[in-house]
Structures are given as structure tokens and as C-alpha cells.
Image (cartoon, helix red, strand yellow):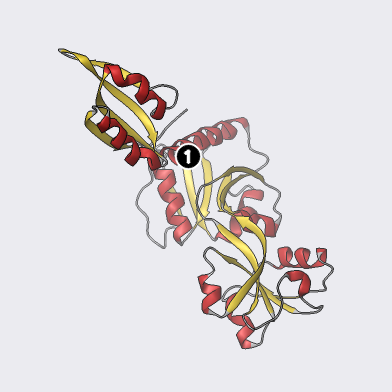
Amino acid sequence: MEMLKIAIPNKGRLSEKIYNLLDCAGLVFPSKDERTLQVTTKDKKYSIIFIRTQDIPMFVENGIADIGFTGFDILTELKSDVDKIMDLDFGYCEMVVAVKEEDVYKTSNDLPQNLKIATSFPNIAREYFEKLGKNPNIIEVSGATEITPRLGLADVVVDITSSGSTLKSNKLRIIDKILESTAIVISNKNLNNDKKDKVQTLLRALKSVIDAREKKYLMAHVPKNALDEIKTFLPGLSSPTIMTLAGDENNVVMHVVVNADEVFDSIDRLKKLGGKGILIMTVDQMVR
């Protein structure tokens, strides 16, 4: 049985979230530090390779890794020949066009020809401006893009932002959005059947963890005569689980999965209907 090789970013918040996600999904890896390049599960079924986020699509395309976790923005920039197999619920950011605060431009269409555009995403930037009929002078930088207009290196930047605060702190103003990006899972296109099965098993486990993060498990003693009303606001995944209470003919135990953002109101309504002994627990995984 072949080992499934998984590429994840070697550092940063995205790396930590992905490593935690894999751990919550049930893949048990040994401890690591910043210098760790590869770890393997005790059962030898899965291996993680730690590499630069920007290099992950290339590693997956060339079969060095079977699947990888990267950003949609990076995959779009590199146009790697891989399959995008899952969108994740974190790592959200936007790729934007920004100019100096004092510039008069309101949208990218207002920009004149031959402006110098600094970016870490030259392919996306060039394609975007050429579609607008512009003739961009692309200046590729590997970091600190937002400082280039004040240094005179560029007139415009195409950069990634999650809140816009870094651009604002450098006195830049967003005039357009090119794309939205989140963390994604990509796969090599030539996996054998054994590895394809492993990938599907892993994706199900990842989805069960992601789905569970939005849920809570609620248990409560509730009056039998209030069950019909309770089911209207606590329907569960399909229907609540109801269990009898020893020696109590008037009350039952209700078990139900509830949306995390509805817990507060649900408890209040349960109490008003006679609910007691209410317990709220986290859900580690939820397989539908």
C-alpha cells in the first residue's frame, strides 16, 4: 500500500491551520519544529512535506506530492496542471488594485497607459490589465509590494489583502478587486486507484471537521408535551434523538445537533418551555 504524500506550507498562519486541520481529521503526526521538512504518520499511510506555499502547485503537478494545500490566488497565478478538489473555510483574501491616496483614479479603467505596476502576481496582473486594453509595465517583487509607490518604484500595486489595513497604513487606496481567494486542496492528475481512495477518505475526514466547527451538540431534559414546539426551532440534522428518563413519564432526554450561532437563543427558548439540565458540547467531527 503506497503512502499518500501531502504538501503543506512550511510556515505562517496558513501552515498552522492546515496542520491542525489534519490533526483534527485523525492523522497522527509526530511533533515538529520550524526546521522539520517531512513527517510521517505512525501507520506509514500519510506523509507531510513542508515547502513554500508558492512551490506547492509545482510539487503536486510533478508528482513529488500527491495532494497539496495552497491558495487559489497562487494556483491562478501559476496555472499549474492539477485538479482543484476542495475549497477550505479559511485563508480568505482578495487580490486588489491600489494606488496612492492622492491619485485621482477611481477604477482601473481610469489608469493611463504604461504605468509601472508592482506585484508578486505578474501573470494575473498582466492578463487583467491587458483585458482592459492597457499596456502594463509589470515590475515583479517578492514582498513589501505596498511600499513601492512611495519609493518611486511603481505607480500602482496589485496585491493580496485580507483587511486592507496594510495598504491603508502605506497610504494606498483600493480602486478595484481582481479576485477572491481561500485556501484550497489540489491533487495530481495521475494518481492510481489506491491513492485516489486515500484522497477521498481524507477529504471526507477534512469536511467532517470543517462542518463540525459550525455545530454544537445539545442535550437537555424537556417536557414531552413541549416536544412538537421544540422541534420547530431544534430540528437537528434530520430529527432530534429522544430518550426516556427512568421513573419520569413527563420528561424525556433530547439530543440534538444545533448551529453554533443559534445556541444562545435555543437555550433561552428551551428554558421557557421547561427545559432543564442543558449541556452544550463541542463537536469534533460530523459525518453526514
Q: Position of residue 145 (x, y in %)?
A: 60, 75
Q: How many marks?
A: 1
Which picture quadrant has residue 154? bottom right
Q: Position of residue 252 (x, y in %)?
A: 25, 18
Residue 235 in view here: no
Q: Residue at x 59, y 34 (%)?
A: 196
The one nearer the camera, 197 or 92, is 92
The one nearer the camera, 166 or 110, is 110
Q: Residue at x 36, y 19 (%)?
A: 228
Q: From the viewer's perspective, is residue 275 above or below residue 172?
A: above
The one nearer the camera, 42 or 83, is 83
Q: Residue at x 29, y 31 (%)?
A: 270
Q: Is residue 146 left or right of residue 12?
A: right
Q: From the viewer's perspective, is residue 92 above or below residue 228?
A: below
Q: Amino acid at mark 1?
A: Leu
Which picture quadrant has residue 192? top right
Q: Position of residue 89 (x, y in %)?
A: 51, 47
Residue with the mark numbered 1: 206
Residue 229 in view here: yes
Element at label 1? helix
Q: Position of residue 136 (x, y in %)?
A: 78, 74
Label 1 CA crowd tier, 10 Å (few <14, some 14–19, many 20+): many
